[in-house]
Image (spheres, grey):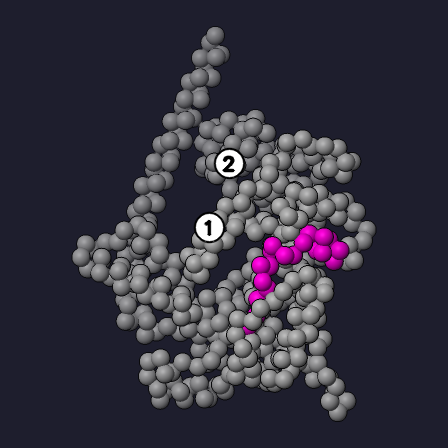
């Protein structure tokens, strides 16, 4: 029961005010949504604990039914897929929305597999892992390029249609080899595979992101084993691999080593995971630290640019870090428009303020000193924070009034029923 309680707590974290969660609690826990929202708004955890216990108990019964092979009927709704446009790349991505019981089952499986994930996932894997974000990737890659590891060349690759081509069956085989005695977890995984459209991993699924990273850890470990014997010493083809979900930055010492590693890695992906990989870049030769610094002192403008690793929204070099060119161009348009609006009206529209704050992380986490001066990013950020803070206070006031009004209506109707 502790496993289910932990899984429900993990699922509910930060979601208590969501409309679908309040509806779910009202239906399955029996607490009116207005009462629940009113009493938990000020941090009262008693109702939250009660909801977690009731949901965990129902979840335990549902899992028992699944393990016993009993039909759940239409309890778990189908996976709905919506096409959304990626704001940075412009690509249309199919993002799935899962039924809440489907989400809870995924959290139970993930919680039970936590020891395996902790043992198998590598320090160089990022995205969908707590504490492993774009900033962590940027810092780690820059540290590897600065250290005396002999890294002189790199290439960038990613998996083609990663989630759509990685089947649940392949991942379940890997997990079964690691923990063959986890019969219940494996049976739950096979049940979740029947809910997945096409039997492949679901884009937008919580568990699916962990399963994908788990499968990719095998590919990274295989790449580290590639090399050749020279004078009785093993010389690896790959020094480091930086991974951001399905994107790989492969760092090595020689061109021939990276070429051999790419061919073998491509075959390994096809044979073991049924995936295809594509190369975003050819093999790039990196400048040495002093050469980068000297070029920065001598050249001006775009002529100062040096080859680097383009990952996670950053262009990572040995001696400095800049924003990805595509990200910079989008951010630059927002800064220019925002500065024009700020000078004309003394404030910013709310949508523009959100964009200014969103792009601030790329400035803060890169060596974009001239960008800050040229585009007045500090003044824009200060104005954007004031605008967002004002609207947040207004929204909070309106939301509180609506919650209180709904609570009053509930109490009034309750009193009328009691009087009858």
Q: Cβ–Cβ below 8 Å for labels 2 and 1?
A: no
Q: What residue range appears in magenta? A: 156-174
Q: Residue at x 67, y 71 (%)?
A: 265
Question: Which residue does the numbered mark 2 point to in the structure image?
Answer: 20
The quadrant in which residue 366 appears is: bottom left
Q: CA–CA distance between discs 2 and 1?
A: 20 Å
Q: Is residue 244 above or below residue 233?
A: above
Q: Is residue 386 above or below residue 379?
A: above
Q: Is residue 363 left or right of residue 339?
A: right
The quadrant in which residue 385 appears is: bottom left
Q: Residue at x 56, y 71 (%)?
A: 279
Q: Indicate yes or no whether the magenta region holds residue 93.
A: no
Q: Residue at x 77, y 58 (%)?
A: 178
Question: Which residue does the numbered mark 1 point to in the structure image?
Answer: 84
The circle on residue 27 is: none
Label 2 Cα crowd, 10 Å radius (few <14 / some 14-19 / many 20+): few
């Amino acid at each position: 029961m502790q496993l289910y309680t932990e899984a429900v707590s993990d699922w509910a974290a930060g979601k208590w005010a969501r409309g679908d969660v309040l509806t779910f609690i009202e239906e399955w826990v029996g607490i009116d949504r207005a009462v629940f929202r009113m009493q938990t708004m000020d941090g009262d955890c008693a109702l939250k604990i009660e909801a977690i216990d009731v949901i965990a108990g129902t979840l335990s019964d549902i899992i028992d039914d699944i393990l016993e092979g009993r039909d759940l009927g239409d309890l778990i709704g189908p996976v709905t897929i919506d096409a959304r446009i990626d704001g940075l790349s412009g690509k249309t991505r199919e993002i799935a929305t899962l039924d809440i019981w489907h989400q809870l089952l995924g959290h139970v499986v993930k919680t039970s597999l936590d020891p395996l994930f902790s043992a198998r996932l590598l320090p160089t894997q990022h995205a969908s892992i707590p504490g492993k974000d774009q900033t962590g990737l940027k810092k780690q890659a820059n540290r590897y390029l600065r250290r005396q590891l002999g890294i002189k060349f790199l290439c960038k690759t990613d998996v083609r249609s990663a989630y759509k081509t990685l089947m649940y069956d392949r991942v379940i085989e890997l997990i079964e080899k690691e923990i063959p005695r986890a019969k219940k977890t494996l049976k739950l995984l096979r049940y979740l595979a029947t809910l997945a459209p096409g039997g492949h991993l679901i884009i937008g699924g919580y568990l699916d992101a962990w399963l994908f990273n788990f499968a990719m850890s095998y590919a990274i470990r295989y790449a580290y084993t590639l090399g050749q014997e020279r004078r009785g010493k093993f010389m690896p083809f790959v020094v480091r691999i930086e991974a951001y979900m399905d994107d790989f930055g492969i760092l090595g010492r020689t061109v021939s080593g990276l070429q051999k590693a790419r061919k073998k890695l491509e075959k390994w992906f096809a044979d073991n995971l049924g995936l295809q990989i594509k190369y975003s870049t050819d093999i790039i030769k990196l400048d040495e630290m002093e050469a980068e610094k000297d070029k920065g002192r001598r050249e001006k403008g775009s002529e100062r640019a040096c080859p680097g690793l383009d990952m996670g929204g950053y262009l990572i070099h040995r001696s400095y870090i800049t924003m990805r060119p595509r990200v910079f161009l989008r951010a630059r348009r927002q800064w220019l428009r925002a500065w024009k609006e700020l000078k004309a009206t003394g404030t910013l529209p709310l949508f523009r303020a959100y964009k200014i704050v969103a792009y601030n992380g790329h400035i803060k986490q890169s060596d974009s000193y001239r960008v800050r001066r040229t585009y007045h990013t500090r003044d824009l950020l200060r104005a954007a924070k004031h605008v967002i803070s004002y609207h947040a206070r207004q929204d909070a006031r309106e939301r509180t009034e609506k919650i209180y009004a709904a609570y009053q209506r509930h109490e009034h109707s309750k009193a009328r029923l009691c009087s009858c």
